[in-house]
């Protein structure tokens, strides 16, 4: 797919054609940040195929500088990524009437949330393990660099120092990824907001505990949105943190719960 919004190059996309003559929905997949994207590919592919079997059209896109798309990770900005998601939505809606859902995993949920407020078409959000905030996710990513420096015996980096370098306009390398100030700044200020009315939200988290509840920050956000009239269905599914696991993980129960939510607007009890 050619890039939109004036951005450069091509974007690798995988289109899952819906089973049946008419699509029951149009779903744009927004992948996580950095290495979490690669760890999530298997689950994203399995879920996309499940959606297609259920009659939904799905478009997976590698954002600028990610995966097999054009550009370098260190050249991407937050606005580039949101523009890519909007371009993907336009492509998919040009072939299927909708309704439109932005499906974001981890950081992808923040991008999807932003995109939902920059598109004229009504849309829903499907969130897998969304982070507390973009700032929290950025801090987590910077800590990888601090830990790597300590393992190398350098012990010279701190999160605050790395933030200062970014604020000064420097690009820093973390775990093989070049993080530019323009992307870091966008991530730092990103927050989860529900889609404009009448959009609804499906919020799914995973935990290895059988009796787990939503994370405290997640529960507070869900409650706040519900109190303002947003339709939010939330559930915790038992399974590992596939986006950060050493081995590639599959969670069939998450796929089943997500497919049910997409088709009925509810999650399994």
Image (cartoon, helix red, strand yellow):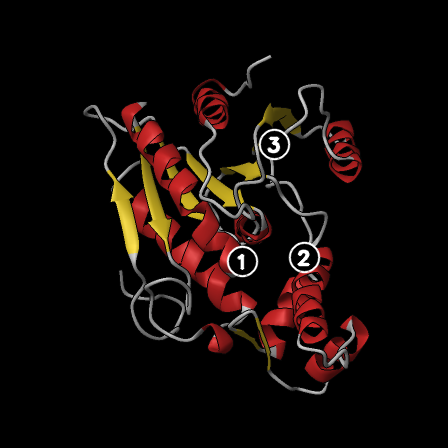
Of labels 2 and 1, earlier in sequence is 1
Of labels 3 and 1, earlier in sequence is 1
Q: Which residue is mark 2?
A: 137
- The picture quadrant where one finds residue 11 is bottom left
Q: Which residue is mark 1?
A: 33
The residue sitting at 50% across, 58% down in the picture is: 35
Kindly state the secondary structure of the residue where label 2 is placed: helix
Quadrant placement of the C terminus: top right
Label 1 environment density (alpha carbons within 10 Å; few <14, some 14–19, many ≥20) = some
Above or below 101: residue 266: above
The residue sitting at 78% across, 40% down in the picture is: 217
Of labels 2 and 3, earlier in sequence is 2
Quadrant placement of the N terminus: bottom left
Q: Are marks 2 and 1 in contact (CB under 8 Å)?
A: yes
Q: Which residue is mark 3?
A: 206
Q: Quote the CA–CA distance across marks 2 and 1.
A: 9 Å
């Amino acid at each position: 797919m050619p890039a939109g919004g004036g951005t450069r190059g091509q974007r690798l996309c995988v289109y899952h054609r819906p089973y049946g003559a008419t699509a029951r929905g149009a779903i744009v997949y927004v992948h996580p940040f950095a290495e979490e994207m690669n760890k999530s590919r298997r689950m994203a592919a399995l879920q996309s195929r499940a959606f297609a079997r259920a009659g939904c059209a799905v478009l997976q896109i590698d954002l600028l500088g990610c995966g097999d798309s054009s550009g370098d990770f260190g050249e991407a900005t937050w606005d580039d990524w949101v523009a890519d998601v909007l371009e993907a939505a336009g492509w998919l809606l040009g072939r299927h009437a909708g309704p439109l859902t932005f499906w974001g995993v981890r950081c992808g949920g923040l991008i999807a949330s932003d995109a939902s407020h920059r598109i004229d078409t009504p849309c829903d959000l499907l969130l897998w393990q969304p982070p507390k905030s973009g700032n929290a996710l950025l801090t987590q990513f910077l800590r990888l660099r601090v830990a790597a420096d300590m393992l190398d015996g350098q012990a010279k980096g701190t999160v605050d120092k790395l933030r200062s370098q970014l604020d000064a306009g420097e690009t820093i390398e973390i775990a093989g990824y070049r993080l530019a100030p323009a992307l870091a700044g966008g991530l730092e200020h990103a927050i989860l907001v529900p889609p404009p009315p009448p959009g609804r939200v499906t919020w799914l988290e995973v935990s290895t505990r059988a009796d787990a509840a939503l994370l405290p920050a997640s529960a507070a956000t869900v409650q706040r949105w519900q109190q303002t009239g947003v339709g939010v269905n939330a559930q915790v599914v038992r399974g590992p943190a596939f986006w950060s696991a050493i081995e590639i993980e599959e969670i069939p129960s998450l796929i089943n719960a997500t497919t049910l939510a997409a088709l009925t607007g509810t999650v399994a009890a």
